[in-house]
Image: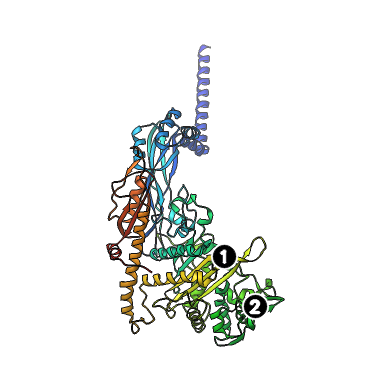
Amino acid sequence: MDQRNARLRWVVIWAVAVVWTLAVLGRLSYVQLFRYSEYFSKAQRQQERVFEISPMRGTIYDRNGRELAVSLPMESCFADPAEITDPAMVARLLSRVLDQPADDLEARIRAAHSPVRLARKLSPEVAERIEAMGLRGVFCQKENRRVYPQRELAASVLGYVDIDEKGIGGIEYSLDKQIRGRPGRMMVMADGRQRWYDRREAAADPGDSVVLTLDEEIQYIAEEELARGIQDTHAKHGTVVVQNPDTGELLAVANWPPFDPNDAGSYPSDARMDRAVSAAYEPGSVFKVITMTGGIESGVVTPDTLLDCQMGSITLAGRVIHDWHPFGLLTVREILEHSSDVGSIKVALRLGAPKFYDVIRSFGIGQTTGILLPGENRGLLRPVDDWSGNSIGSIAIGQEVSVTPVQIISAISAIANGGILYPPRIVRDVRGAAPPPERSERPPRRVTDTRTAASVREMMEDVVLKGTGKLYTQLEGYTAAGKTGTAQKIDPATRRYSHTDYMSSFAGFAPVNDPAVTILVVFDSPRGGHEGNETAGPVFKRVAQRVLAHLDVPHDIPDASGPIETASRARKTSRETAESRLRAAQFKKAVAEVKRAEPAPTMLLDDTNAVVVPDFAGQTVRRATGSCVRLGLAPSMIGNGVALQQSPEAGSRVARGSRVTIVFGSPEAAGAATAGGSGN
């Protein structure tokens, strides 16, 4: 009996063991096969902490390889709440170094469940002080800071980035995927007591660099002359665009008011707007170039066709349109020369609304150009079915139609180059990747024949030589052609044309027979004189004169003191006179800015806030910018080349965050300035 009971007990024990073993194996199999990913992710959340490391954004260059936007490595401070046993104490200690309220730091540490960033882009001195404190759970990690060495130069085209290094405007936004690169990752491993025992980093992939079509020197000229024009006209806004008519490449895009992308948040949105692509306006008489091109191309008129301008008035569908002057019989050539509204309307009437609409559309009006800049406005061109009885007359003189600066300059360039419309280009190359396929550049297309384009070029030259542009747009040593424009703005209160606010413009090119550049100048609401010839015309002249000299374009008209120069002599003269004077003027202006930037005497600085200004002599723009950023100084870079002068002087003690102005150039420029050269 006892033996049987003993065997029974062993059977029960073995049965229980087998059942228990099967249960354990079943559970393990279930966990491993069906719940593996769930438990693995839980373990990772407990043991690993992962956060992104911002990648190095690609550099943005001008067409000659000069840096317009660069990224520099900077230290950022992080805290891991799992490692910090006394957040209040840590916050108090860091508050003194980071210059942030201790309560804010403590709240951020307590609220975080993974490493949290406490401060971004610290100076090397601050990062060293944090590391020296040896606080458990507090560490520094390199991140990148976007810097624009030339400050306001081409800011509306470049755009800017937010605190996370994401593009917000301009090229920084439109090509953000290419420029930004791929973020890196830092993984911190912790044991069961949340103590670190390993840290691994996956390096970020740097972004692709972008080469723009802009020429930094031409951009500087355009911005300087635009600022001078704003000062003379007291206009609210302004735009200057310079284009190569043979390629569509934009050599300069200047907008007023300017802004500094290094501190974009302190400027209103109005200043950050790229008006060259986003601001549509009624072009006024500049649009008559398209009207005349359509009339001549279709054969309804020739440059010598006589039209009766009816002594300054014409009635369309009950509306009386008055000319600016009572003209009688004029040829089509003279109609454009004197900018007769009545004559232009009669050309459009001969052309007819459907054909006129097709001509306008062929020049790209009312359509986006596909330029690789964000916020492009397509302008306004209503379908023919929506035209009123007098719309054809209004559109013929640049009313009831709106354009952007990049649209109208491309249309004028098509006349300059012989009839081919090249879409405006701002990106020359993306190093490492092609431009996004969804925004690929459109192919050029012929919009008028070469004979018509030649005829209109001659007519536009007459505008400069004998017409509305005569007093303000004739160049020295070069032929030029163009068209003035003055358009009344719509008053938002009355919804009628204003008698005080105008859009004044001038669009032209030079030299006439082999155009090197097309230039558009637009002023919004100038005060005093408001006609395009007296406001925008002088700016066109100054920009054209300086840009042609910079591009080494030979003179194509005789020197006043002798016969026509040969091309080689013209090139030599351009190089030895115009360019040397330009360099001298720029250098003098830069020296003046340095003198104005000299800091006033300040109170004594304590050691924690003082910075010794280094000697930047001979350094490049990039190297000097990096030195300033690392020391916590605000760089203001003027010119290109190597550093020639600086303010404050080397060895000066200034407060962290102070502005340092550095003049760059060549020794030749300094010599020219010393010799007393002068610019235009």
Q: Residues within 10 Å of mark 1 (few under 14, many from 20)?
A: many
Q: Amino acid at mark 2?
A: Ala
Up-down relation of residue 469 to residue 36 (above or below): below
Residue 543's spot in the image, x, y percent? Answer: 43, 69
Instruction: Give the residue number, with chain letter if any, for mark 1.
Output: 280
Q: Residue 25, labelled with which disc?
A: none
| Farthest residue, direction right | 318
Q: How is the image coloured?
A: rainbow
- Give SS at disc 2: helix
Instruction: Give the residue number, with chain letter if any, for mark 2.
Output: 353
Q: Is residue 427 visible?
A: no
Up-down relation of residue 78 to residue 15 (above or below): below
Q: Nearer the viewer, residue 229 or 510?
A: 229
Q: Nearer the viewer, residue 176 or 303?
A: 303
Q: Amino acid at mark 1?
A: Ala
- Give SS at disc 1: loop
Q: Is residue 523 visible?
A: yes
